[in-house]
Image: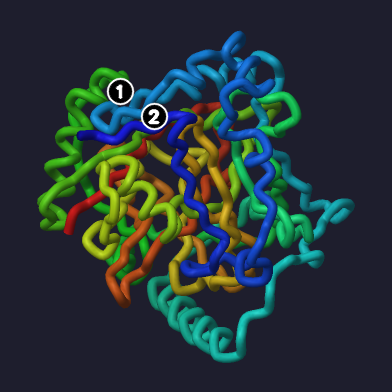
């Protein structure tokens, strides 16, 4: 029998430990999670009564593992946008007037960890030099701000209906203007999932119209088969997809922050949620993302990916993503000059980038830190970059 989740059986990660990294958890075993003051509501309380009147779907909707793409919070987000509350967070600018980079909540790494990072950094820099990779430097590249707040309060994003008193997020970004992003074009072969956490491959798809119907009925089934063969796995379960457009507002790229999508904790919760497993063995499952641009040629908004071994545990801060039935967990990321970033400048719709969401294989890159960014060398910034991304669980 399939499991279903609603407010009466809300699935929470229930994690404040440091088992998979995350700087705030190691220093603060008990950390406040602001959304838990509101959700899930208890039958008969004021929030329950208000939702019963204004948004009853939030109380009656149940997640169906056989239909994972039924996502009513998209409608709620449109309501938020109509009320002028669409912006989830804001970014402190790079002009120095409100730069809090030095006010960091990072805990210094141990000496042995620093040595390992430096060794891996030297290897990565040698690779960049050997391949003669050129780079671009965005005017702004956004990390999580180094605020003391996150010692006491876990970052979160709300996908709930508008709840009086609960902000959409407590996440504040910090822009940096000195981040180099290296172009791998012509040297894609040097970057593989197991070591770098990402790789570029050609996966042609023949269509002129990326409609929702095409994606669900043709694209996703074909990618299930492609992934099954590529990874020689038993089963492939696509649990999420997005067809998105990156647009500009008043000449500025809409907000993006550096992040990683799946923690060790949330890999377990995802298996329980999507595969209806009570006691999953995460060693038997791998989480993969596939990102494909739908526009031809250089775009103002490519996807940048960070080499896994240049990221330290001290750079990571766990964050909650709260849905009506489930609390997901991801990583926000703090700035570290040791990070080495890469992108492919001239992708076509036949190009995809695969990157690890969570790989439990010992010795492999576990996850991939990534972010979209504005390429300052592309002139036609008024254009819209469209892309399609899917996320899949592989039974290995």
What residue do we see at 73% from left, 44% from top? 91
On the image, the x and y values in percent for residue 292 come to 33, 40
On the image, the x and y values in percent for residue 324 come to 50, 30
Q: Nearer the viewer, residue 381 or 238?
A: 238
Check the image and report above or below for 110 versus 69: below
On the image, the x and y values in percent for residue 101 come to 77, 62
Q: Which mark is residue 210?
A: 1
Question: Marks 1 and 2: in contact by CB < 8 Å?
Answer: yes
Q: Which mark is residue 243?
A: 2
Check the image and report above or below for 258 versus 159: below
What residue do we see at 38% from left, 66% from top? 366
Q: Quadrant of the C terminus?
A: bottom left
* Element assignment for label 1: loop
What residue do we see at 49% from left, 30% from top? 7
Figure quadrant of residue 187? bottom left
Check the image and report above or below for 134 versus 215: below
Mark 2 or 1 closer to N-term? 1
On the image, the x and y values in percent for residue 4 come to 33, 32
């Amino acid at each position: 029998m399939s499991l279903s989740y609603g407010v009466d059986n809300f699935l929470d990660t229930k994690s404040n430990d440091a088992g998979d990294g995350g700087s705030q958890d190691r220093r603060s075993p008990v950390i406040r999670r602001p959304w838990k003051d509101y959700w899930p509501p208890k039958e008969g309380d004021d929030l329950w009564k208000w939702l019963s009147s204004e948004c009853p779907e939030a109380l009656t909707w149940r997640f169906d593992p056989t239909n994972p793409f039924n996502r009513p919070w998209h409608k709620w987000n449109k309501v938020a946008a109509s009320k002028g509350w669409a912006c989830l967070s804001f970014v402190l600018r790079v002009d120095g007037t409100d730069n809090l980079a030095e006010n960091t909540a990072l805990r210094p790494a141990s000496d042995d960890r620093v040595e390992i990072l430096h060794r891996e950094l030297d290897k990565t820099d040698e690779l960049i030099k050997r391949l003669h990779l050129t780079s671009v430097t965005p005017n702004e590249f956004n990390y999580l701000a180094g605020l003391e707040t996150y010692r006491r309060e876990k970052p979160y994003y709300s996908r709930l209906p508008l709840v009086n008193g609960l902000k959409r997020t407590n996440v504040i970004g910090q822009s940096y203007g000195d981040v180099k992003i290296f172009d791998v074009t012509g040297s894609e072969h040097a970057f593989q999932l197991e070591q770098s956490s990402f790789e570029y491959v050609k996966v042609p798809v023949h269509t002129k119209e990326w409609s929702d119907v095409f994606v669900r009925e043709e694209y996703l089934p074909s990618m299930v088969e492609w992934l099954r063969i590529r990874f020689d796995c038993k089963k492939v379960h696509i649990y999420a997809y997005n067809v998105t457009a990156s647009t500009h507002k008043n000449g500025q790229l809409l907000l993006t922050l550096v992040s990683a999508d799946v923690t060790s904790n949330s890999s377990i919760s995802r298996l329980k949620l999507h595969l209806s497993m009570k006691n999953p063995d995460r060693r038997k499952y791998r989480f993969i993302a596939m990102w494909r641009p739908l526009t031809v040629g250089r775009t103002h908004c490519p996807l940048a990916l960070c080499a896994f071994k240049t990221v330290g545990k001290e750079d990571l801060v766990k964050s909650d993503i709260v849905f009506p039935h489930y609390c997901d967990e991801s990583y926000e990321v703090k700035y570290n000059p040791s990070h080495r970033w890469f992108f492919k400048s001239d992708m076509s719709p036949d190009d995809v980038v695969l990157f690890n969401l969570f790989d439990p294989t010992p010795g492999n890159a576990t996850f991939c830190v990534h972010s979209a960014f504005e390429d300052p060398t592309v002139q036609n910034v008024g254009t819209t970059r469209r892309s399609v991304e899917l996320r899949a669980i592989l039974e290995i």
